[in-house]
Image (spheres, rainbow, N blue to C red):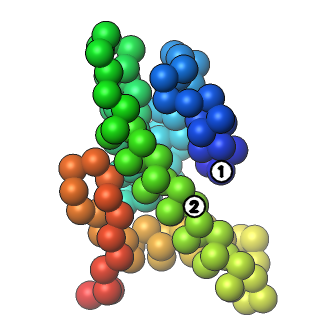
Amino acid sequence: MTSALSELLILGLQRVDAQTLRYWQELERQGKALGFVRLLKPIAQLVTALAQKTITLDWNGQAAAESMLAIALLVKLAQEQLSNDANSISTKNAGGVLTELDSSLSWTGSHGGAGRSSKP
Protein backbone atom coordinates (compact mmCIF):
# COMPACT_ATOMS: atom_id res chain seq x y z
CA MET A 1 0.00 0.00 0.00
CA THR A 2 2.90 2.33 0.69
CA SER A 3 4.13 2.02 -2.87
CA ALA A 4 0.62 2.59 -4.27
CA LEU A 5 0.21 5.71 -2.17
CA SER A 6 3.68 6.96 -3.13
CA GLU A 7 2.91 6.44 -6.80
CA LEU A 8 -0.35 8.34 -6.46
CA LEU A 9 1.42 11.23 -4.72
CA ILE A 10 4.07 11.38 -7.44
CA LEU A 11 1.57 11.00 -10.27
CA GLY A 12 -0.83 13.56 -8.88
CA LEU A 13 -4.59 13.30 -8.63
CA GLN A 14 -5.21 15.17 -11.88
CA ARG A 15 -3.22 12.56 -13.84
CA VAL A 16 -4.96 9.49 -12.46
CA ASP A 17 -6.00 7.11 -15.21
CA ALA A 18 -8.12 3.96 -15.46
CA GLN A 19 -5.15 1.72 -14.65
CA THR A 20 -4.50 3.58 -11.38
CA LEU A 21 -8.18 3.33 -10.49
CA ARG A 22 -8.18 -0.43 -11.16
CA TYR A 23 -5.10 -0.84 -8.96
CA TRP A 24 -6.79 0.89 -6.01
CA GLN A 25 -9.98 -1.11 -6.62
CA GLU A 26 -7.88 -4.28 -6.41
CA LEU A 27 -6.30 -3.11 -3.13
CA GLU A 28 -9.80 -2.53 -1.77
CA ARG A 29 -10.94 -5.98 -2.94
CA GLN A 30 -7.95 -7.66 -1.29
CA GLY A 31 -8.59 -5.79 1.96
CA LYS A 32 -12.22 -6.90 1.95
CA ALA A 33 -11.10 -10.48 1.37
CA LEU A 34 -8.90 -10.21 4.47
CA GLY A 35 -11.80 -8.86 6.51
CA PHE A 36 -10.55 -5.35 7.20
CA VAL A 37 -13.46 -2.98 7.65
CA ARG A 38 -12.35 0.29 9.21
CA LEU A 39 -8.98 0.26 7.50
CA LEU A 40 -10.75 0.11 4.13
CA LYS A 41 -13.01 3.09 4.61
CA PRO A 42 -10.53 5.71 3.33
CA ILE A 43 -9.51 3.40 0.49
CA ALA A 44 -13.16 2.94 -0.52
CA GLN A 45 -13.62 6.71 -0.38
CA LEU A 46 -10.53 7.21 -2.53
CA VAL A 47 -11.77 4.67 -5.07
CA THR A 48 -15.15 6.42 -5.19
CA ALA A 49 -13.51 9.82 -5.67
CA LEU A 50 -11.19 8.52 -8.40
CA ALA A 51 -14.11 6.84 -10.16
CA GLN A 52 -15.97 10.17 -10.12
CA LYS A 53 -12.98 11.74 -11.87
CA THR A 54 -13.48 9.47 -14.87
CA ILE A 55 -17.07 10.67 -15.37
CA THR A 56 -16.83 14.32 -14.30
CA LEU A 57 -15.40 17.12 -16.43
CA ASP A 58 -14.97 19.60 -13.58
CA TRP A 59 -13.67 17.21 -10.91
CA ASN A 60 -12.71 18.47 -7.47
CA GLY A 61 -9.97 16.33 -5.92
CA GLN A 62 -10.53 17.43 -2.31
CA ALA A 63 -12.28 14.21 -1.25
CA ALA A 64 -9.52 12.13 -2.87
CA ALA A 65 -6.82 14.21 -1.17
CA GLU A 66 -8.49 13.82 2.22
CA SER A 67 -8.71 10.06 1.69
CA MET A 68 -5.04 9.96 0.74
CA LEU A 69 -4.14 11.73 3.99
CA ALA A 70 -6.18 9.23 5.99
CA ILE A 71 -4.48 6.34 4.17
CA ALA A 72 -1.05 7.86 4.85
CA LEU A 73 -1.95 8.11 8.54
CA LEU A 74 -3.01 4.46 8.63
CA VAL A 75 0.18 3.35 6.91
CA LYS A 76 2.24 5.34 9.43
CA LEU A 77 0.29 3.92 12.40
CA ALA A 78 0.70 0.37 11.11
CA GLN A 79 4.43 0.89 10.52
CA GLU A 80 4.89 2.30 14.03
CA GLN A 81 2.89 -0.51 15.59
CA LEU A 82 4.89 -3.15 13.74
CA SER A 83 8.15 -1.38 14.62
CA ASN A 84 7.24 -1.12 18.32
CA ASP A 85 6.27 -4.76 18.47
CA ALA A 86 9.09 -6.05 16.25
CA ASN A 87 10.71 -7.98 19.09
CA SER A 88 7.54 -9.84 19.98
CA ILE A 89 5.81 -10.22 16.61
CA SER A 90 6.64 -12.88 14.11
CA THR A 91 5.74 -12.48 10.45
CA LYS A 92 2.76 -14.79 10.85
CA ASN A 93 1.33 -12.49 13.55
CA ALA A 94 1.63 -9.24 11.55
CA GLY A 95 -1.94 -9.72 10.28
CA GLY A 96 -3.09 -9.79 13.90
CA VAL A 97 -1.54 -6.37 14.49
CA LEU A 98 -3.42 -4.97 11.49
CA THR A 99 -6.64 -6.57 12.70
CA GLU A 100 -6.12 -4.99 16.13
CA LEU A 101 -5.41 -1.63 14.50
CA ASP A 102 -8.54 -2.03 12.36
CA SER A 103 -10.72 -2.73 15.38
CA SER A 104 -9.31 0.21 17.36
CA LEU A 105 -10.05 2.87 14.75
CA SER A 106 -13.23 4.82 14.24
CA TRP A 107 -13.91 7.17 11.35
CA THR A 108 -15.57 10.54 11.39
CA GLY A 109 -16.55 12.93 8.66
CA SER A 110 -17.77 12.14 5.18
CA HIS A 111 -14.41 12.06 3.45
CA GLY A 112 -12.25 9.85 5.61
CA GLY A 113 -11.07 12.09 8.43
CA ALA A 114 -9.44 9.69 10.84
CA GLY A 115 -9.98 9.72 14.54
CA ARG A 116 -8.74 7.44 17.25
CA SER A 117 -11.18 6.08 19.76
CA SER A 118 -10.64 4.14 22.94
CA LYS A 119 -11.44 0.47 22.86
CA PRO A 120 -14.81 -0.48 24.34
Q: Nearer the viewer, residue 73 or 103?
A: 73
- The residue shown at (31%, 10%) is 57
Mark 1–mark 2 contact, CB under 8 Å? yes
Establish if 39 lies above or below 96: above
> How many angstroms separate mark 1 from mark 2 (CA)?
7 Å
Q: Residues within 10 Å of mark 1 (few under 14, many from 20)?
A: few
Query: Quick check: can you spot residue 68?
Result: yes
- Point out which mark residue 17 bears: none
Report which residue position mark 1 lands on. Answer: 2
Q: Nearer the viewer, residue 55 or 99?
A: 55
- The residue shown at (65%, 43%) is 6
Q: Quadrant of residue 102?
A: bottom left
Q: Quadrant of residue 44?
A: top left
Query: Quick check: can you spot residue 35?
Result: no
Question: Can you give x and y, in whole percent of width and height, for residue 61 in the image?
Answer: 37, 32
- Judge left or right: residue 28 versus residue 93: left
Quick one: SS at disc 2? helix
- Judge left or right: residue 40 versus residue 120: right
Q: Residues within 10 Å of mark 2 (few under 14, many from 20)?
A: some
Establish if 37 lies above or below 51: below
Amino acid type at mark 1: Thr
Question: Can you give x and y, in whole percent of width and height, for residue 94 in the image?
Answer: 66, 71
Question: Can you give x and y, in whole percent of width and height, for residue 59 in the image?
Answer: 32, 21
Query: Number of marks in the image?
Result: 2
Question: Can you give x and y, in whole percent of width and height, for residue 115 in the image?
Answer: 33, 70
Amino acid type at mark 2: Val
Quick one: SS at disc 1? helix
Report which residue position mark 2 lands on. Answer: 75
Q: Mark 1 vs mark 2: which is more N-terminal?
A: 1
Q: Quadrant of residue 46?
A: top left
Q: Nearer the viewer, residue 39 or 2?
A: 2
